[in-house]
Image (spheres, grey):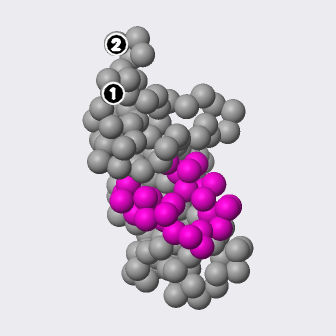
Amino acid sequence: MKSHRSNVFRPFSATRAQARTERPLPLTARMKARQSHKIRELAEAIKCARFVTLDEQAKALGLSRSTAWTIRKASHKASGLSASIINRMLAAPQLPPLARTKILEYVEEKAAGLYGGSRTQRRKFAARLSIEKLPVCGETESTLVPEHNGITGANGERPWVIPDSRSGS
């Protein structure tokens, strides 16, 4: 009796299939997953501060209900939270301290390029922020430095820039 190929046990195929499922995600997918995780941490911080309903969360964040819903579900567009949304959240009077910390961590990580984006995109993002001084995230040194050309923004603050490794800043 002839055995058909389909009936033959091939352990090598099973090993290959298992190896395919254990491959690490591509870098861009890992960066986006990290970004979504940080946004989920922000949503959890709001929830832990006893802002349970969507209306309460939107008010605490200083955002519309639809934007608060997007943050709550961590389903923000590919580029993540914009500088204008971050500025509105940081200006919200009811923003809980833990949520503020999560937002500042997000800003630091996004400006450092941990969520992707070109140097130009990150520089523009940092320039649009209304943050007096960006905090240092964890034990790492900040990747942003104030621009020393005397130019200030419309609100009188100095813009933050990502140092160009070629200029020695």
Front one among 133 and 39: 133
Pointer 1 residue: 150
Residue 56 sits in quarter: bottom right
| Horizontal side of residue 151 vs 109, given as left or right | left
How far is the residue under mark 1 from the one under mark 2? 21 Å
Q: What predominant SS class does the magenta segment belong to? A: helix
* Residue 33, image x, y percentages: 50, 54
What residue span does the magenta drawing correspond to? 82-107
Q: Position of residue 24 (x, y in %)?
A: 53, 44
Q: Secondary structure at mark 1?
A: loop
Sequence order check: which comes first, mark 1 or mark 2? Answer: 1
Question: Which residue does the image show at 38% across and 32% down from the upper left?
Answer: 161
Of residues 92 and 139, the one nearer the viewer is 92
- The crowd level at tag 1 (other Cα within 10 Å; few <14, some 14-19, many 20+) is few
Quarter of the picture holding the C terminus:
top left
Residue 80 in picture, x, y percent from top left = 40, 57
Instruction: Give yes or no for residue 85 being in the magenta stretch.
Output: yes
Q: Position of residue 83 (x, y in %)?
A: 38, 54
Residue on which disc 2 sits? 166
Asked whether residue 17 appears in the rendered view, the answer is no
- In the shown orientation, is residue 52 left or right of residue 57? right
Residue 82 makes an appearance in the image: yes
The residue shown at (44%, 69%) is: 75
Vertically, is 81 above or below 126?
below
The three-letter code of the residue at mark 2 reads Arg
Q: Residues within 10 Å of mark 2 (few under 14, many from 20)?
A: few
The residue lying at 33 percent from left, 27 percent from top is: 150
